[in-house]
Image (cartoon, helix red, strand yellow):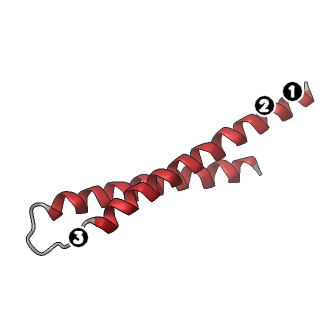
């Protein structure tokens, strides 16, 4: 069960980094391409990706704490 929680959080962090990287690339292109448009959506995506990454990191931390608590109970 903990393995699935850890995998889900890890995959969420990886996806947040991927989205953030893609948005940053889009923003950098906005200043080099005449027809890109408004980078506002990408800026919002970066903020949302940051929040997603932080939430998934908290899930990892909580899972670690749960594992330690279970091990303490078994000791």
Of callouts 2 and 3, the N-terminal one: 3
- Mark 3 Cα-neighbour bin, 10 Å: few <14, some 14–19, many ≥20: few
Residue 72: numbered disc: 1
> In the displayed structure, would residue 62 be above or below residue 10?
above
> Residue at 74% of width from left, 47% of height from top?
2
Spatial CA distance of label 1 from label 2 is: 6 Å
Where is the C terminus found, in terms of image quarters? Answer: top right
- Circle 2 sits on which residue? 68
Q: Does the CB distance between marks 1 and 2 fall below 8 Å? A: yes
Residue at 54 percent of width and 55 percent of height: 12
Q: CA distance from mark 1 to mark 3?
A: 53 Å
Residue 29: where, in percent of width, then height? 16, 62
Q: Earlier in the sequence, mark 1 or mark 3?
A: 3
Residue 61, x across and y down, in percent: 65, 38
Q: Secondary structure at mark 1?
A: helix
Identify the residue at the far top of this view.
Answer: 75
Rendering quarter of residue 67: top right
Number of marks present in the image shown: 3
Label 2, residues with CA under 10 Å away: few <14, some 14-19, many ≥20: few
- Name which residue lies at 52% across and 54% down: 52
Residue 56 image point, x, y percent: 58, 49
| Above or below for 37 versus 71 | below
| Residue closest to the eye, 55 or 2 | 55
Find numbered disc 3 in the image and state the secondary structure of the residue it sits on: loop
Q: Which residue is mark 3?
A: 38
Query: What percent of the width, then of the height, locates residue 73?
Result: 91, 30
Return the residue nearer the eye: 37 or 26: 37
Is 26 placed left or right of 67 in the picture? Answer: left
Answer whether labels 2 and 3 touch (C-beta < 8 Å). Answer: no
Drawn side of residue 31 relative to residue 20, left or right = left
User: Label 1 neighbourhood size at 10 Å, few (<14), some (14-19), many (20+)?
Assistant: few
Disc on res. 44: none
């Amino acid at each position: 069960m903990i393995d699935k929680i850890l995998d889900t959080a890890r995959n969420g962090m990886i996806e947040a980094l991927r989205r953030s990287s893609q948005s940053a690339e889009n923003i950098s292109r906005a200043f080099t391409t005449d027809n890109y448009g408004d980078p506002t959506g990408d800026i919002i995506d970066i903020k949302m990706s940051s929040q997603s990454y932080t939430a998934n990191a908290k899930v990892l931390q909580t899972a670690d704490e749960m594992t330690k608590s279970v091990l303490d109970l078994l000791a």
